[in-house]
Image: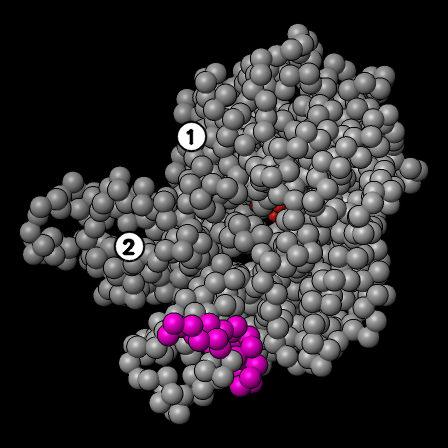
Amino acid sequence: MESDSDSDGSHVSATPPRDPYQPPPPPPSPPPRQSTTSSKKSKPSLKPKRPPIPIPIPNPKPKPSLSPSPPSSPTPSPLSTLPFQILRRTSDHHHHHDDPISAAQTLPARHFSNSASFSKLNKPSLNFEPLEPSTTVTDHFQSNSEATNSANSHKVVKRHSNLIGSNPPLPPAKLRKCGNEGNFVKLNLNGKRRKFANKGKTRRNIYGSYSSGSRKFHRKKKRKVEGEGEGEDEKNVREEDGLVVETEQQKQKQESGRAKLDCQLIEEAALAARNEASDENLLKLLNLVYGYDSFRDGQLEAIKMVLAGESAMLVLPTGAGKSLCYQLPAMVLPGLTLVVSPLVALMIDQLRQLPPVIPGGLLCSSQTLEEVSETLRKLQEGTIKVLFVSPERFLNAEFLSVVSTNLSISLVVVDEAHCVSEWSHNFRPSFMRLRASMLRDRLNVGCILAMTATATVTTLNAVMSALAIPQTNLIQKEQLRENLQLSVSLSGNRMKDLLTLMKSSPFKEVKSIILYCKFQSETDLISRYLCDNNISAKSYHSGIPAKNRSRTQELFCSNKIRVIVATVAFGMGLDKQDVGAVIHYSLPESLEEYVQEIGRAGRDGRLSYCHLLFDDDTYFKLRSLMHSEGVDEHAVNKFLNQVFNDKNSHGKICSLVKDSASRMFDMKEEVMLTLLTNLELGEVQYLRLLPQLNVTCTLNFHKTSPVLLAEINRVVAAILKKSEAKQGQYLFDIPTVANSIGITAIDLSNQLQNLKFKGEITYEVKDMAFCYKIMKVPGDFCSLSAHLTKWLSEVETCKVRKLDTMFNAAVFAANVCEKKHGCFGSQHTPCLQKKILGYFNEDDNSDISNKMGQISRFLQADIKVFLQSNSHVKFNPRAVARIMHGIASPSYPSMIWSKTHFWGRYTQIDFQVIMEAAKAELMNYVGKESL
Ligand SMILES: Nc1ncnc2c1ncn2[C@@H]1O[C@H](COP(=O)(O)OP(=O)(O)OP(=O)(O)O)[C@@H](O)[C@H]1O
């Protein structure tokens, strides 16, 4: 069993149902929903019409339509706190995703020119890079563009300025308005490079007209329109092109005039808001850029606070519009806005959703050096206004030098800010880099906007304290949307129950469903199962190559598949408006995760359905997994001794080979990284983490003799000194050689690369390692390891409590709820809402009960037999308890230990109880000194 919930740690039984299942009483059916393609009737808009403004503004996202007389909702929840109106899902509403034009209308409409009168600080202003049509597609989304291209080789797909691919093409009418489409981010996620034939040639100026390089674009377009071109003589095409270009140029002239006017209006509005951040000025800007008539609950408050230079903590439900709370200030504030997000995919989505008037960029670890330097160059030029950056990149030396010397940062946004706190469901050690003191010291940042949809009071307090946000600056709205109808059922046979559920109302009418599973193998199995039962489905998890994943997401977003069967890897940041249902096939690990995932449904404000199927087995399995990252003080102590193995190592670059260290200390890689990050970012800075690299090098000399080369090259001289020579090959440790001549390991790698290019050497590297520079050797290893172990164990306990709370809420709804306050059948919206809000507010701090057994008659005897039958192996209590729970660890891999009779035999007994029993038995057991 693996600890990673998005990993293939478990197997799902496909055995036929054992127990006859009574499906939950179906809720009253909403009217049937028709297929996407058939529903194109225009419907009255959800929102009041915007007042006319001087220039034609393309519509904002098509509003979900109302069916004339929606049936009354079965959920009696009050709607007063809702940030937007709830509509009941109906079958015939318009689905813009099927329609490229309306899909494109989901893109914000306005564009800026380079003539921006915004003062440039070194000068991130609302300007745009020239367009490189085909290069706005990243490798990440290459599959989509390839699909488009192969469908019509002459069709050039133009893209939204902040698009990174996989986006609906803009219709010509919209394109004309784009004065600027130059933002693109290339991510080499697949490790491949895409060649752009006309890169650097096709340019579009800031008002949308084309420079000479753009003739190709028109030529292709013309061929497509007139069905010509195939096999046609290039010269003819060029002659005809003359006419086409002329008319196009006339049109563009007119349009560029209009675009210029639009830009001026936006610039004026932004400047007005900068001078006076009044409701009126901000509303005008909102309307001009997004086409929205009003701010949603919490937005204006947050925007004004940030514009006043005050840090804020913003807690709004999923889909309530948090992104707008930094996008709009980014237009008004003079400096750069940095947005830190936990996931690359999330940053890509956010960059894509940036209005075209805001030039954006991205920096993350999956980019190549070339891509990183391109972004840094743009930053220096001031052509990026909002930069998405991963926390790992955040305080990296090169980034810091560019940012701190050339740019002024107006705002740092910490998205999914709960990741800062170890008491959240999703703690990211790298988010520790975002402490306010560090931001102030290194980047001179005064204003921080932290945003989350899912945080308990404890988490919020931890985040606000780390980011130095005063309590008075907490803007918090209820963390649940009211348009989600929550139902729960305890399942004896989840596969059968799932099918029954999906074939009954209201789910059978819902066209777009996310089905969440815990394990990768489950998603594959369930998607096949659904397909076998005529439900179009595809699986999505991190084990699927990025290219295929984005293709699946694209198919789902364009409603080509009805159900996406996904692990937790899917959904964060997904802003598909018309997801009508979210089904949990497995118990989420926490109420936060549950709320985050159901938050993918009903973002269009319509009533949407969320069903949780749960069972005891999954709970026990997850509970076991909660213990897979636990460590003992003894192991932490050994780890620290290894990290600081040379007591006089101040300033030295060291490395820890991941595989061997992981086995040596029986610690997962993530745990070692958490410890190292704590040693870097905790109260005392003991070390500084450096990029990970392969540290063992085997080298051969080819041209010049090693000794002669060493005379003119100090790297070679150092290698000869520090390596072991064997049969003409030189074996050495990269950090050791780097240290000996006082350069970084990365510099050494670069120099080796140079020698290789010159034909002097060939070499191979292996052993991926954590690399770090020692800043201070701890004085007392024992107290430091005690401190770190206590901290890790508290984090583990916190996770376990979260799972128990989630399970208890489901059990309460399914078994205990008396259905007095609006709950009925399997529907438990009121009681679950109460539990969730109480949990976030921490109303109930009493002990959380759990279903784990505290005693077992045979446990002690089984442990004894196990130890006796494996007398040749050294165990500690944690290792024994893990085996009894069926959890693999680096030193006790499942490939070997799952064969034992006792593997996973005691998943229903509390982990601590087994640890205690194992400890007692190991004490008795002669020859075991591992305690
Ligand atoms: N004032 C507004 N009026 C109408 N629509 C809005 C408004 N503000 C934001 N939206 C729209 O709401 C949708 C959701 O916004 P956004 O993605 O920022 O939500 P979020 O709070 O970040 O959600 P999540 O936490 O799930 O990522 C977007 O399509 C956005 O354009």
The residue under the point 49% across, 32% down is: 539
Amino acid of disc 2: Lys
**Real-space Cα separation, disc 2 to disc 1, in angstroms:** 35 Å
Residue 894, percent across and down?
Answer: 61, 39
Count how many numbered circles sit on residues in the image. 2
The residue under the point 45% across, 29% down is: 561
In front: 645, or 469?
Answer: 645
- The residue that label 2 is drawn on is 251
In front: 205, or 404?
Answer: 404
Which residues lie in the magenta part?
723-749
Colouring scheme applied when the structure was drawn: one colour
Is residue 302 among the parts visible in the rendering? no
- The residue that label 1 is drawn on is 560
Q: Does the magenta stretch include residue 733?
A: yes
Q: On the rendering, which quadrant does ligand 1 occupy?
A: top right
Residue 626 in the image: above or below residue 263:
above
